[in-house]
Amino acid sequence: MATSTSSRAKRASAAELVIITGLSGSGKGTFLRALEDIGFYTVDNLPVDLLPTFAELTQHATDIRRAAIVIDVREGKALARFPDLFRELRARVRMTLVFLEADEAAISRRFSETRRPHPLGKGRSLGRSIAAERERLAPIRALAEPVINTTHLTANQLRKLIVEKFSSARTGPPIAVSVVSFGFKNGLPSDADLVFDVRFLPNPNYVPELRKKTGKDAEVARFLHAQPQTEEFVGKIAELLLYLVPLYIKEGKSYLTIAFGCTGGHHRSVMIADEVRARLAKAGYRARGSHRDIKKEY
């Protein structure tokens, strides 16, 4: 009997429930299908009032160790009860609340491409529907960790991010670190927790033979490493992050996005992001790198 009780306790502590919510057109369906592909039991549009029952099921069912559900504005007025239910459940159930969003222009384009109506579209323009949905979901967004902006992500990039964050094979410290490069001329990454400006470094864009290359090319790396401030900056930033990340972990943060920006997002930010990511990985953190603007036109 003791062994059986112990086994149930271990199974419950290992069980994982991921709740996906967010704006219509932000990629919730893609997110759910990607989780299903890596072994999650998935349910789309679960009624809010069934959440406590479903959460308990994930803790005690012998054949469901990881589950994912989508809850969104299709639920109607009952959605207003979700924040209180979530606060109550997360004290005893291992849960992750993921909120997906995107810029209005991106959502409008996606609805135009699929020709699907917005769930709140009756009697409203698409723009007003999106605004109403943001307002209705604001209390839920405030509870979410992580919040993922999919504006600049393709479906394949989103699936890759999901696999990296939720794969059962992941090991190491309980935080996933994303190190992103970007160009200030294209706007700040909306999901960045920390942003560093590297435009103080000499710009390879003004060196004719380097202009069409990127920070991933050896010639650009050599050029930047030749600047004395580069090594000092990377060292100080790495030291700062190695101090901060354990504090984020202590506070319960599961995901951390660190962004490095230069003018166009092709040279300096790319090289620096790769250097910092490598140092974090060497220190044992699950650090992934991405370069938002590296393929955009100069």
Image (tube, grey):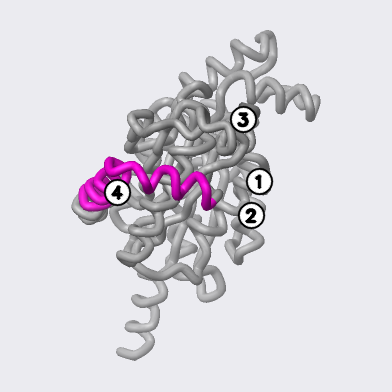
* Residue 30: mark in rendering: 1
Instruction: Give amino acid for label 1.
Output: Thr
Identify which residue is drawn at 28% across, 44% down. 228
The reply, left or right, for residue 92 in relation to residue 156 is left
Could you tell which of marks 4 and 1 lies nearer the N-terminus?
A: 1
Q: Mark 3 and 1 residues: CB-CB less than 8 Å, in contact?
A: no
Question: In terms of image quadrants, where is residue 80?
Answer: top left
Q: Position of residue 102 (x, y in %)?
A: 56, 28
Residue at 35 percent of width and 50 percent of height: 89
- Give the spatial CA distance, label 2 vs label 3: 17 Å
Judged by its main secondary structure, the magenta piece is helix
- Of label 3 and label 1, which has the lower sequence position? 3
Query: Gap between marks 4 and 2, in whole Å?
Result: 39 Å
Neighbour tally class for label 1: few under 14, some 14-19, many 20 plus, Cα within 10 Å: some
Q: Is residue 78 visible?
A: no
- In primary-sequence order, the first of circles 2 and 3 is 3
> Circles 2 and 1: CB distance less than 8 Å?
yes
Residue tagged by mark 4?
Answer: 231
Q: Secondary structure at mark 4?
A: helix
**Sequence-wise first label, 4 or 3:** 3
Q: Which residue is mark 2?
A: 34
**Mark 3 or 1: the one toward you:** 1
Residue beneath label 3, please?
Answer: 24
